[in-house]
Every structure is written in C-alpha cells, then in structure tokens.
Image (cartoon, rainbow, N blue to C red):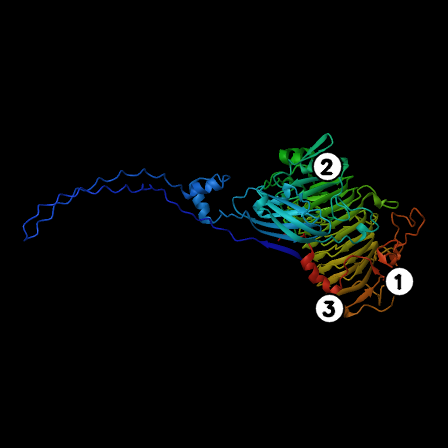
Amino acid sequence: MRFKKLLLLPFATFSLLISSCAQVGPQGPAGEAGIQGEAGPKGDKGDTGETGPKGDKGETGATGATGEAGKSAYELYKENHPEYNKSEEEWLEDLANGVLSTNKVVEVYANGLENRIELTTVVSKNIARIEVSYSSDNGKTFTKIDDELVEINNSRAAILGLKEGTYQVKVVPDGQEDQAVVIRDVKVGDTDRSGYGFFNATEGIGAYNLDGTLKENTKVVYVTEETKNTVELVNGDKTYKGLGDIMAHAKDITTPLVVRIKGQINANQFKPKSFPIVYWSETGGSSDNGYGEVHENFLDEPSVYTNELEDTYEDFLGLSSSVSVNLTAEQIDELFGEREKELVNIRSSGRYDNCDSGMNMLYVNDAKNITVEGVFDDAIINQWGLTFQKSSSIEVANLTFQNYPEDACAFENNDQKGEGQDVNISSRFFLHHTTFLQGKNNWDLTAEQDKHEGDGSNDIKGISYYTSAYNKFIDCHKTGLIGGGNSNYSANITYHHNLYQGYADSQRTPLGRRANVHMYNNYYLSGLRVLDFRNDGYGFSENNFFENCVQPFCVDYSTEPNHGAIKSYNDIFYHCGPLDADKIVQDRFETGNEYYSANHYDVNARTVAVKDDTWHTYPFNGKTEDAEGNSLDYAHFDTDSKLFYYDETNKCSDVEIMLEAEDVKDYLLEHSGPMFSL
C-alpha cells in the first residue's frame, strides 16, 4: 500500500482575556510650599523661644482625564478574523472546544491506489469548503478536481482518472492559498487489465483509456440518493433528467459517459409475502414444496397474487419491473393500487405455474463507452440491478450490489441465438473491484421458488471479450451464468483474482455453455457446484485455490458428444469433494490415463486433469474459420496465441499477475472488492 501522511502543528488554542475597566488619569502637580513665618524677637539669653506656626498646605492639582475603555477578547478576535460572524456567546463556546485554531487544515492523508488517489482530510470546524487539486509535473501546474469528489462533512476526497506515476496533492481551505497543504510523492499504480477483455485491444474499455485517464470529451454524471431522479445530462439540444432517463438514452450519447455513484442508491420492491406453491398431480391432488401452506382450491385465491410496493425509499423512476400473476386483466385492475400499476408492468400469466416476478432492472441498450463506478467504497446499489444489452465497451467498477430482486449486473446480446450468432455485437466488458452480496426477492412468484436470493449476480449471454477481476461474491446463490441455454454462444471469457465465499447452495461460479473460459488465481470457499461446464463449454482452470467445496468441478455428460470439459492446471484443492475428471497429466500439454486419487485433501496437491484427450472444436460465432480463413479450433485455445494470451516463448499465460495457488487466498482476502478508503 502506498501511503502518505502529513501532520501539521497541533491545534493552537486561542486564549486571550482583557477586562473592560476605567483608566486613572495622571497625578496632579504638588502644591506650593506655605510662606515661612517671621522670626520672633531676639529674647534675652535664657530660655529658647517657641517655634513659629507651620505654613498652610498648597492646593491639590486638578484630576486627570478618564482613560478610554479597553476592548474585550472577542472584539480583538473579530478585528483579526473579519470572516468570523458568530456571536460572543458562540465564540466562547468555540474557544472552549478548541476550534479557533490558526491552522485551517490539520491533517491530510493521501493513499495512492490504482489510477486514483483517496484523501482523508481533517479540518477545523469553521471551514466551509476545501479545494483539492493535483500535479503530475512536480508542482508546476495543478488541476482542480470536481467539487462532487470532495465530501468535507465525511472528511474525504477522491482523485479519479490518473495514469500511473508520482503526484503532488494540494488542499486549500476556504480559498486561502496561504493555508494550503501540499503532499508530495504520492505514488499511483495502474489497474490490472489482463484477460480476454483486453486481448488485442487497441483502446480502453468504458470511459477510460488504457492508461487509466478519461477518454476525450467524456461526459461525467454524479448520482446520489437525493439526485437519482433529478440529476441532468445535456446531450446536444436534449436534456435527460434522472439516472433512469439518462441510461435509457445512452444509445444517443455519442461521447463516452461515466456515471459516478456516491453513497447508497435505493429502490423499493414489493413487500414480503409468502407464495404457497402447489404442484397438481394427474389425479388433481396437490403437494407442498416447502414454501407456505397447501391450498386445495389454490387457483381460487386471488389474494395470493396481489401485493403492494414498499415505501421505504423515494421511488426510483425509470426502472423496469414486471410480474406475471394468475389473475385476469379485470382482477389486476381492481386489486392493485395505482402506484403499483404505474411503476410495475403487471401481466396475466394464465396459470399458476407460469408466474414470475422481475423487479427493478435498469436496462441499457445499444450503448458503448460507458463506465458506471463508485466514487468511494460505500457506493451501494440497493434493491435494483443493471443489464447492458447489445452494448460494447462497458465497465462497472468499485460498487456493491445487495438485495437485488432480479439480476445484479448482467451483460448480454438479447436478440441472437444459435448457429451464426455474432457475439461481437456485445463485446469488450470489464467488471472489477466490485462486491456482490446476496440478493433478495420479497415476492418470489416462480414455481421453482429459486429467486428468494434474487436471480443471477453476474450473468453473461451471447457476448465476447469479457474480464471479471478482483471482485468479491459473498453468499450468492446463482452467482454467474454463461449462456442462457445450449443455443447461446459466448466467447473469450476470463475470471481472475475473484473471491467466491459461498454457502451450502451456492453454485454457478461459473456455469458455462458454448464458451471458452479461462479462470486463474481465484479463491473458491465453500459452495455446492463450483466450476460447472456443459454443452461445448471449455474451462481452463489455472492456479486457483479451492477450499471446502462440495463439487469443485462438475461436467455434464448429457449432451454427448458435445459435453463440457474442464482442464485443471496447478490448482489447489483443500478439504474438497471428488473432482469430476477421470484423467490427469503432468504438465500443460501432456495427457495421461491415471485416475484422480485422493490428493484433493492435500493442501500441497498439484493436479492437471482433462476430461478428454482432446476437446471438441468450439466454433467462434458459430463458425470454424475467421474472415481470413484461419482455423477457429478452440479445442486447445489455452496454448494457441492466435486465440489466447499465450506466451509461446515462456509457455505460460501472458498476464500481469500470476500467483502461485497457495498465495491466492491471502492475497484476495486483502485485494478483492471495492478499492478502500483510509
């Protein structure tokens, strides 16, 4: 960690007491001496005559003029601090609390991270604002950051979009340059842009260049809970109002766009309500699957299918919500409130086993060069999610998703499926430094009852060139799906340096179909089915750490001959169940016939396992050749430099950071999830 700390002098306590009093004038002059009496007649010699009487005392001088009244300490302070406008009583309180410091900024901490600097600023209580600027040329010129990146009440600021290098940071309180604090030698690192997302890339993903700086003419929008429906973006002669409206028109924005989330942004969902599912047998009986009570006359209970929205937060306008209920159109109109009908598309399903609820999705279509990022590590997406469809060059970073009733963050090509599908329509995605907590659907209407914890945390379908890195998944259920079915192709997918902390039913980390996937330096803790590959899904697992996993590998043979395959290289399996692999090899290329033994209980185990001697040809875009006629045989993509970031000289994956498997756990416990504040 690069860390700078500047300590100025401690608070100087101002203490001055001058009493108001009268000033005594100077002493008057002394009076003249009295006249000496005449000498008595000379007597006869004998007794001495009596002393003559003493002369009269001179008159007292006049009293001097009264001195001017002295000034109080409060008045003297006001003279020297004309900006101070509080009463004398408030001043005495400030004096007692030690806030009348001559130092405006007392402490500044600067933390250089990846393409950003985060500051903690401790200022005196009478400061109204601070300005933060940075210099990359040793203090010759400074660039001021946006005011929205400074939160004086939270004692913090963030400088975003910096290339790797050494910087100076200047903090100026209340515009007073003479009170400025300058921190020197703040070192900023670069983001690890490894994996397929950046394979053969010529430009950055989202609104940022490959060096971490903003692309030219990027529009910047700051969003808070208070401004989610009012924030505005001017695009030519159009003005979009509210985050929902801005993202709905993302396809019309021709310049890069970065949406910066500050704090927690919320949406309401339906109130908690149980849904008693009944499975009807051929004889007309019913059975309960564990959720709610059994109702023999289930279809005659419209109250089961009605609900109302929470009013915990201000409504988030522009989200897409829909429910399918077993009611007629007339019943829907009668039983649901006006607010529910305005915010949610409520449809008639026709039967109880076709019900569903999909809530609070912010869909972004046909967009490109967009970044959605958290400014600080407390940027939270609460009870809603993002889905990018038919979009390219999309980045999501430094956020936390929680309580999502549907998907949290998804990328997909929503139109095409099957042979000939062009996965380049949705291409180049970078998801990093983000935490996914468990979802929450208060009103799961599905017959399967598998949405209580939301739907997918991070699903991708029909896309290409994707990197998921340095993310943290905590107690997620359906964590990550690649492909929505056997007819959906994806290509060139990488997961690296992610932490998956599961529970008894955690799965899909990922579940892959018809895609080539590289997974390296990930930490898998617990979970049911971890790496799950089906129908031409090719997974290359390298230097990962598996701990307490029920099924580290799961391969579906039901789609013979095109079943999935997993190749494991230098992975560690600690207290895990048996692997679904029947052959092991000694290095990246060698094949063998030995069956997998009990080594998965050994923390030092090193195994290389492949499902078959060769993998099936995976057709990129549903084709076996590219436009130049080159073979697109993905059977051994991990050793083909035309198809994969493979270093032919050193015979290894060409990535920024490749840890030994035994080092992965400790590294990710510190480095996964949002980049942290001080």
In space, the residues marked 2 and 3 are separated at their CA atoms by 50 Å
The amino acid pointed to by label 2 is Ala
Find numbered disc 3 in the image and state the secondary structure of the residue it sits on: loop
The amino acid pointed to by label 1 is Asp
Q: Nearer the viewer, residue 677 or 189?
A: 189
Q: Kindly identify which residue carries mark 3.
A: 603
Q: Kindly identify which residue carries mark 1.
A: 613
Q: As displayed, is residue 547 above or below residue 619? A: below
* Mark 2 or mark 1, whichever is nearer to me: 2
Q: Earlier in the sequence, mark 2 or mark 1?
A: 2
Do we see residue 331 in this rendering? no
Q: Within 10 Å of the Cα at label 1, are there few (<14), some (14-19), or many (20+) other Cα atoms? A: few
Left or right: residue 425 versus residue 100 is: right
Q: Within 10 Å of the Cα at label 3, are there few (<14), some (14-19), or many (20+) other Cα atoms? A: some
Q: Kindly identify which residue carries mark 2.
A: 248
Residue 497 lies in what quarter of the image?
bottom right
Question: Mark 1–mark 3 contact, CB under 8 Å?
Answer: no
- Give x and y (percent) for residue 247: 72, 38
* Mark 1 or mark 3, whichever is nearer to me: 3
